[in-house]
Image: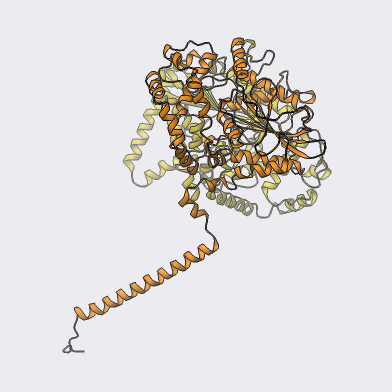
Chain colours: A orange, B yellow
Amino acid sequence: MRTVEAVVAVVTTCIVFGASSAYSKNLDLGTIVFANILFRHGDRTPVDPYPTDPWGNETLWPVPFGQLTNVGKSQHLRLGRWFRERYSHLLPECYTPYDVYVQSTDIDRTLMSAEANLAGLYPPEGDQVWDKLKWMPIPVHTIPELEDSLLASKKYCPKYEMELQNVMNSPEIRKIDDDNQELYNYLSKKAGTMVQSVSDVSGIYNTLFIEVLYNRTLPEWTKSVYPDKLKPLADFSFTVEAHNKLLQRLKSGRLLGEMVDHLVSKSKNALFPNRKIWIYSAHDTTVANFLMTLDLFEPHCPPYTATVLVELRVNSLKQHIVTISYKNTSAEPRLLTLPGCEVACPLGKFVELTNDMIPKDWAKECLLGWEQYAHNITMPSIFGISILLLVIIILLGLLIIGVVYYHRNCDSNRYYFKLTTDPI
Amino acid sequence: MEKSSEKSSSVPIEIETESDQMDTPGGFLANSCRRGRRGVCVSVVVFGAIIACVLLAFTAFASPAHTSRNLQQVLIVFRHGDKNPAETYPNDPYANHEWPDGWGALTKKGMLQLYTLGQRLRVMYRSLLGDKYQSKDLLVYSSYADRCIMSAQALLAALYQPGTEDMFIPGLAWRPIPVHTIPRHIDKLIVAKAPCPRLDRELQQAYLNFSASANGSLDTMYRELSGYTGKNIASVLDVELLYNLLEIEVLNNLKLPEWAKNYYNNRTRELAAQSLALFTSNVMQRRLRGGEYNGRSRAAVDTNRTVVDAGPLLKEILTNMWMRRNGTDDRKMYLYSAHDLTLVTILRTMGFTEELTRPEYGAALIFELYTTAGGQDHEVRISYLNNTETNVPHVMNVKGCGEPCLLETLFEVWEPVLPQDWNSECLT
């Protein structure tokens, strides 16, 4: 286990970005008064090994596929302890629901990561000790994935699906697919599954990455492609789900919107209950899409426990500022600069800059063109439609009356003749 | 259960609004005889007699077969633990009481109650579950409420306490286990708050019927209570909520105001129990109210399962057992962390309608599925733990199911209370 952890640490520290932030030591960052925290779960087993994988038998792994391992649990427990340190001035040692809210996607590994994290953040203290355990239950909230448009973002959104197809068929992505066709064919043949896109490559890369992490010998065929040829494509694949403004707005916009709401309410002393931190437990794609949405993403695979902090601070001039930090190594987080703003971004400016990315009515924006008409019914259109309908009904009525009248006349004249000889 | 049955003999008001088919299996037989279908009647009686003889012979002579009974699956619906009051009333002397962790929160005592239940379940089902947590063995659902999520977590902390070698951090004898919660507005399974117009109408009618049968006898009480509490007490539900609050204050050694002495008694307790029962006062309510789960979402939680059909909690439980029987589900345990109303509702849906119940903290309804006769038969045993202090589960015999009670028979007995299509039935 030690070696695995060591490898995790090495690999995570190896992922280095072009430092774009204009970090300087005399920044007036003041003190943190509120934090939105978004993180990826901890170390897990492969989710879906490729068909010819020699390690594709679940019994070869410590836990079933896609589950959090003991390494993953301790990673998050330690991250929780790190939060305890960072927010010690903000968070009382005793847990109350009035200080923190925790939301997770409805997947075992994220639910468990959140619980392990809270075990590190809130070991029971004083009055709260209820058993000899150094743990206490703390609620983690979730929503079934297919109902979740906020965090898991798996709720069906037709507009998003259509736009994603457009992006997948765009010249840019097409070119990448064409350039790598040979690699795709090679992978398809060797891995025993159709590889047609960068996402497919990313899936195989992820499995191989974990197998290396666990000291598993990779099959011979991987030597020519792993990691050098696969990694750039896997890195790039994390830019696809939120590739343009529309995809970003529909995929991560609600999450960003909720975070901005917290910041604004907090700054006005209008956050009820007056919470200090809000925790979101999710996946690598969630982290990548969120950073894409803020235009802060450098293509990479977000490592285990990668954390984005969107924090509200009060500086020495008593102004509210927002900072975005990314912690993807065991070191201190790196400050990121929202394009168009400074590192210490004034709250008003932050709201203004993110406003574009936040859907006003997600469900409505998800509808396709013709479906949106149904939502766009205004008074004039109702009036117009009713008049039109009325006219049609009147015309139809006249037509029917006309036809009936005509037939009556015809009928009585054609088939029956008055017999003048009839006795009365 | 036993406690409340004593008291229910003095119930002043009849809330059963219609005769329950399920309670009178003889009715069907009598009817078919009367309608001149003598042949059917005679053959049913003869076959019944033969089956009875065979069963009798089986139980008399083949009792060693019981030793070959194999536990396949356990499903448990339990109430959360001790909690702080969720609300107060204007004249409450303790309106500003400092409840640790706040209103409605699970208390330390509550955590220990569920922890104790977890320890008991560990002893009862060690051979079924094994010593180590296997994610495939177990699925845990909880109501949206914090106290239910925390109760489930506390129970799991004891049910799967890791040994030294399984600890992920040295010195912490705990491991995280996923608890799947369902937001209130889409919950058809546990709190049953998903919109259902038919249920809303039925509940309104139940309240009207209750007032009609009370015939004004409660008006004085409502008026006096409204005066004392400073809150409009106008229905049996208001009385129930007030009683719950008083009960928690007494449990926490808070002295009740003078007026409450006349109301904190068995009569009000009965009313509170009746209020819980009003949600399942007739077959239609029982059918739609066990709460229905959104099958689509569940499929997402658990991709191994193919059930798209949606059913109430009782139907969900039966379906799980049925899938276990078919071999399409190999989970060993399902846990549902719920409320007092959930337990009352499912008990009444199962046909236990005679006695009024107010489930205690940590009360648990346990379904066990066994294979018997060399894997041929599937027997269901149902028991109820009154609270987390009792060691002896109360065996629940479903009327009309017999002994042993087979899974197939349960489907027949409960046919009237298992909805075919919850969504469309809600719109009728």
Figure check: B44 above or below A85 = below
What is the tally of numbered marks visible in this picture? 0
* Residue nearer the viewer, B280 or A208: A208
Q: Residue B37: tell me if it is visible.
A: yes
Figure check: A336 above or below A381 = above
Instruction: Please state the horizontal and vertical placement of residue B258, each as a whole percent of the image.
Output: 83, 43
Figure check: A382 above or below B14 = below
Left or right of A53, for residue A327: right
The quadrant of the picture occupied by the N terminus of chain B is top right
Residue B409 lies in what quarter of the image?
A: top left
Q: Residue furthest left?
A: A421
* Residue nearer the viewer, A139 or B73: A139
Residue A394 lies in what quarter of the image?
A: bottom left
Instruction: Please state the horizontal and vertical placement of residue A414, each as a whole percent of the image.
Output: 19, 79
Residue A345 lies in what quarter of the image?
A: top right
Left or right of A221, for residue B356: right
Instruction: Please state the horizontal and vertical placement of residue B272, each as a whole percent of the image.
Output: 67, 42
Residue in the picture at 70% in, 26% down: B111
* Residue nearer the viewer, A139 or A207: A207
Q: Residue B9: tell me if it is visible.
A: no
* Residue nearer the viewer, B319 or A364: A364
Instruction: Please state the horizontal and vertical placement of residue A110, each as a whole percent of the image.
Output: 59, 27
Residue in the picture at 58% in, 48% down: A361
Figure check: B420 above or below A72 = below
Left or right of A364, for residue A130: right
